[in-house]
């Protein structure tokens, strides 16, 4: 009797979680937790936190139009959700990072084009904004790649 062995088909249920997912997911969650802390401290106007800014900067933050607060909310919490999604191996992590990217786009539009927020915050803010853009785009691409490989389900 001749038997043939079927080649094992890798399905999302049997795909091993690569070590790099735990590293990237954990570091991204840590990074995004700092963004969430900044968001919460600013939204709740925590004096101890806001005292690190100049009065002009504080007035700028507290003067955000409602739509900026909304896109900032999507940007911050989309990133947190995306990082959690990575750690849970969920394909919706990509959607969460897309939502975050849309929020970042709205905040950047307000800060860099509609107001002089970048000048008010100083050169460090430009560098931080560039890092945030690179990380969100990178995490979005990373989650797409992991979805195509069957790691995220």
Image (cartoon, rainbow, N blue to C red):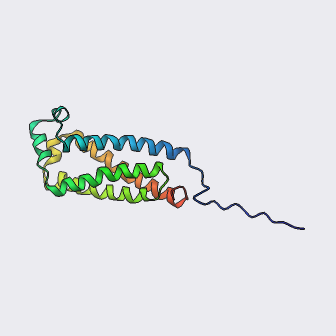
Q: Position of residue 2 (x, y in %)?
A: 87, 67
Question: In the rendered image, which quarter is residue 121 located in?
Answer: top left
Q: Position of residue 80 (x, y in %)?
A: 36, 48
Query: Vertically, is 6 above or below 53?
Result: below
Looking at this view, name the residue that lies furthest to the right: 1
State the residue at coordinates (90%, 68%): 1
State the residue at coordinates (45%, 46%): 25
Side of 21 relative to 137 (left or right): right
Q: How many marks?
A: 0
**Residue 142 versus residue 44: which sits nearer the camera?**
44
**Residue 108 visible:** no
Q: Position of residue 22 (x, y in %)?
A: 50, 44
Looking at this view, name the residue that lies furthest to the bottom: 1
State the residue at coordinates (23%, 57%): 106
**Residue 106 visible:** yes
Q: Position of residue 5 (x, y in %)?
A: 78, 63
Side of 73 relative to 152 (left or right): left
State the residue at coordinates (13%, 54%): 65
């Amino acid at each position: 009797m001749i038997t043939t062995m079927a080649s094992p088909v890798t399905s999302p249920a049997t795909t091993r979680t690569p070590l790099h997912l735990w590293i990237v997911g954990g570091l991204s969650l840590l990074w995004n937790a700092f963004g969430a802390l900044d968001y919460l401290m600013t939204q709740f106007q925590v004096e101890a936190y806001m005292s690190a800014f100049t009065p002009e900067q504080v007035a700028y933050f507290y003067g955000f139009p409602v739509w900026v607060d909304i896109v900032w909310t999507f940007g911050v919490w989309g990133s947190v959700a995306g990082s959690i999604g990575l750690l849970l191996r969920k394909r919706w992590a990509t959607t969460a990072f897309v939502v975050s990217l849309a929020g970042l786009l709205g905040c950047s539009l307000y800060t860099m084009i509609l107001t002089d927020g970048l000048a008010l915050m100083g050169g460090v803010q430009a560098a931080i904004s560039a890092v945030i853009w690179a990380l969100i785009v990178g995490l979005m691409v990373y989650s797409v790649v992991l979805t195509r490989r069957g790691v995220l389900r």
